[in-house]
């Protein structure tokens, strides 16, 4: 599994969403013209499975880091944007995705900084 930084809340032009993050998540979903098929909210992070409303096999999994206010795409072996709810359940268990919602810094530790080769 890999995490790919997408953008920050600031880059979206939004103010600080804390402690109520519903608005920033809704803006994020609107960007992809999608809905949240699953939304697991924890104090430090939020796991979101985003899908196109008309296609339940179009899901992708994202992590929102509430402290850094940044969104990440989680990628796995195989297609990352054709996931189903069943796939989400399997990946949740297989990769222990809840640990990343509990501690988003675990994911960021895996992402090389922009200045490194």
Image (cartoon, helix red, strand yellow):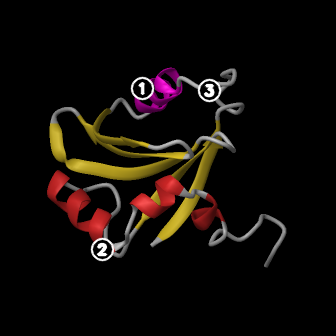
Q: Main secondary structure of the magenta part?
A: helix
Measured from the top left, where is residue 20 in percent x and y? 53, 23
State which quadrant residue 117 falls in: bottom right
The mark that comes first in sequence, 1 or 3, is: 3
> As drawn, is 99 to the left or to the right of 16?
left
User: Which residue shows up at 41% across the image and 35% down it?
Assistant: 32
Measured from the top left, where is residue 96 in percent x and y? 37, 68
Q: Nearer the observer, disc 1 or disc 3?
A: 3
Mark 1 lies on residue = 30
Image position of 37 with respect to 15: above or below: below
> As drawn, is 47 to the left or to the right of 92?
right
Mark 2 lies on residue = 94
Identify the element where label 2 is drawn.
helix
Mark 3 lies on residue = 18
The mark that comes first in sequence, 2 or 3, is: 3
Identify the element where label 1 is drawn.
helix
Residue at the far bottom: name it: 117
User: Which residue shows up at 37% across the image and 72% down it?
Assistant: 95
**The N terminus sits in image quarter:** bottom left
State which quadrant residue 90 falls in: bottom left
- Label 2 – label 3 distance at C-alpha: 30 Å
Asked if marks 1 and 2 touch (Cβ < 8 Å), the reply is no
Q: Nearer the observer, disc 1 or disc 2?
A: 2
Q: Which residues are magenta?
A: 21-31
Identify the element where label 3 is drawn.
loop
> As drawn, is 61 to the left or to the right of 73?
left
User: Which residue shows up at 46% across the image and 44% down it?
Assistant: 42
Crowding at mark 1 (Cα within 10 Å: few <14, some 14-19, many 20+): few
State which quadrant residue 39 falls in: top left
Image position of 93 with respect to 50: above or below: below
Image position of 63 with respect to 89: above or below: above
- Label 1 – label 3 distance at C-alpha: 19 Å
């Amino acid at each position: 599994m890999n995490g790919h930084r997408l953008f920050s809340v600031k880059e979206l032009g939004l103010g600080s969403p804390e402690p109520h993050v519903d608005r920033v998540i809704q803006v994020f979903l609107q960007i992809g013209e999608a809905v949240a098929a699953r939304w697991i909210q924890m104090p430090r992070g939020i796991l979101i499975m985003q899908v196109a409303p008309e296609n339940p096999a179009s899901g992708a999994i994202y992590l929102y880091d509430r402290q850094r206010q940044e969104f990440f795409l989680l990628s796995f072996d195989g297609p990352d944007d054709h996931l189903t709810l069943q796939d989400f359940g399997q990946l949740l268990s297989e990769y222990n995705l809840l640990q990343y919602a509990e501690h988003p810094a675990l994911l960021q530790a895996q992402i090389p900084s922009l200045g490194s080769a």
